[in-house]
Amino acid sequence: MLKPTARMSLRAGVASVAVASLAACGTASSGSDTEAATEIGDAEGTVSILAWPGYVEDGSNDPTVDWVSDFEEATSCEVVSKTYGTSDEAYQLMQSGGYDVVAASGDLTLRLIAADLVSAVNTDLLENYEGIFDFLKDKEWNSVDGVSYGVPHGYGANLLMYNTEVVDPAPTSWDVVFDSASDYAGAVTAYDSPIYIADAAVYLMTHEPDLGITNPYALDEDQFAAAVDLLKLQKESVGEYWSDYLKEIQAFESGDSVVGTTWQVIQNSISTGNTEVVLPEEGATGWSDTWMIASEAESPNCAYMWLDYIASPEANATATAYFGEAPSSEAACDFRDDCEAYHAGDEEYASQIWYWTTPVAECVDGREDVECVDYAEWTKAWQEIKG
């Protein structure tokens, strides 16, 4: 079984409340002022990497888990890494400087770009970039105005999990955790994060079409209010908001939770055999992380070398398998035996995922006649929803 590792409480990063910096950095409709490199020079000798736990393993945590040493031997770039627990913490660390590379989730990338903390990336310099799935390239969370700001890493969907002995018939809609949540009052679980407001928006896109939502991360005041109202109603049936994957496993194994949002790696870890997961008919939110290069990188050459290395099939396979997500490299599945479980490379499946993107005032759906609700307001609303 895949070892469930770093996902645990890590994605709670989007639940953090320190978002004043988002408002300060404005929108990301324009890119960084830093131009991309035109060539890769000699290795500087070291590279400082800021990443989620489980993304930069050198054997110090588990002697059998090491994809850093091969990079160091091949490039003469010694890796110095630091992990972070939340996207807001990562943003603050990037502001302090001293890092060459950062692995950023979609709720962080646009903030880094808008604040000029990362530079555009010349993907032509990266041999392994061509092998990245096309449906992950040049998206609104990793590029601005057609300019790439990084290399996609792993990705996945936030799925609907249910107890097959309790939830009958098998659900095909998020309805069981929204309009019909009272059927399972006290045993519904929801992800503990402001970004979960997007899950309600995805549901409303189908069930309240008059709201005109076309992107769950681009909500005007009326659309945002509708999503918040739906979540306040849902709260009456929620038994637990989760961000720690171990607690999510325990809740489903004990029967305290019977239906709610989850990750594939959690389903893989549950031992009771009475749970299933489904990508509902409305689609789902999800994540696609990005390797980015700091605009003030002291070792830009080693940074580019790391981005190329971690996008290579074997390294990408090893790192994403350890973390519990689909790889971004098409050839990575030659080195994994669980790609089918993660729907790796399944473009039709991936098209149903709304990948986390930082909500900003300038609507990411392209509307110019209205201002969207930014992430700072999402965070305030989330606290109100939870009470």
Image: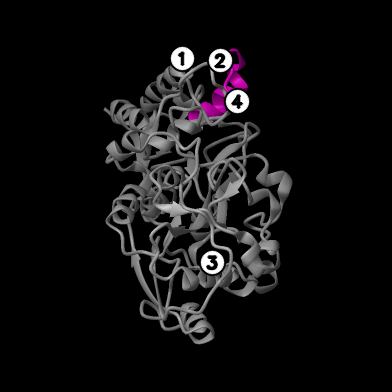
Query: Mark 3 belongs to which amino acid?
Result: Leu
Secondary structure under the numbered disc 1 in the rendered image: helix
The dot on residue 211 is 2
The span from disc 1 to disc 2 (Cα, nearest Å) is: 8 Å
Eyeballing the image, is 313 above or below 77? Answer: above
Query: Mark 2 belongs to which amino acid?
Result: Leu
- Residue matched to label 4: 214
Mark 4 Cα shell of 10 Å, populated few (<14), some (14-19), many (≥20) = some
The answer to whether residue 67 is left or right of residue 86 is: right
The answer to whether residue 366 is left or right of residue 253 is: right
Quick one: label 2 or label 3, which is nearer the N terminus? Answer: 2
- Residue matched to label 3: 307
Secondary structure under the numbered disc 4 in the rendered image: loop
**Magenta-colored span:** 200-213
Q: Looking at this view, is 341 or 40 the one in front?
A: 40
The answer to whether residue 307 is left or right of residue 344 is: left
The span from disc 3 to disc 1 (Cα, nearest Å) is: 41 Å
Mark 1 Cα shell of 10 Å, populated few (<14), some (14-19), many (≥20) = few
